[in-house]
Amino acid sequence: MISIDDKQKNLELLEKTAGMSANQRLVVMLYALHPTDRSGAVLETAANLAKLVGMAPPVFSRTRKQVIEAGWLEETERIGHIKYYRLDPKRMGENVVVRLRRAT
């Protein structure tokens, strides 16, 4: 079940992406809603993601590249020739700074 906080975050994400094309917004929302690993990466191939949203794979890849160039997605890892991405936490308003503590 989606919590009220999650619904609010999704609505805020739609608002933040208002200037993007429909396909770009669809890719951003897909990455926001799709299950992720602990790092926030969507561990799914582009072909499967394209199929999930009804896009031709070349259209999905081109659109995802535009979203990456706009700073919304970042590469998290590469396994062979397959790259995996996550939404940039800074775009989601998350604090990504980890405070260092002095060893005692």
Image (tube, rainbow, N blue to C red):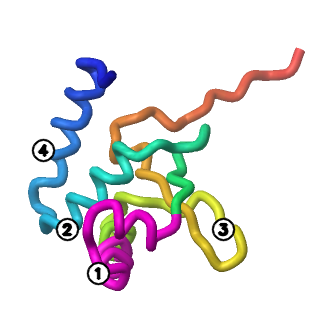
Instruction: Give the CA separation, mark 2 to mark 1.
Output: 9 Å
| Residue on which disc 1 sits | 59
Q: Furthest residue to the top?
A: 104
Q: Residues within 10 Å of mark 1 (few under 14, many from 20)?
A: few
Residue 29 x %, y %: 28, 50
Task: Give the mark, 3 or 2, whose residue is nearer the N terminus.
Answer: 2
The secondary element bearing badge 4 is classed as: helix
State if disc 1 and disc 2 touch (CB < 8 Å): yes
Q: Nearer the viewer, mark 4 or mark 3?
A: 3
For image coordinates 34% across by 61% down, the residue present is 52
For image coordinates 41% across by 51% down, the residue present is 87
| Residue on which disc 3 sits | 78
| Residue on which disc 2 sits | 23
For image coordinates 35% across by 85% down, the residue present is 58
Q: Nearer the viewer, mark 4 or mark 1?
A: 1
Residue 81 x %, y %: 65, 79
Q: Furthest residue to the right?
A: 104
| Residue on which disc 4 sits | 15
Q: Nearer the viewer, mark 1 or mark 3?
A: 1
For image coordinates 63% across by 27% down, the residue present is 99
Task: Give the mark, 4 or 2, whose residue is nearer the N terminus.
Answer: 4
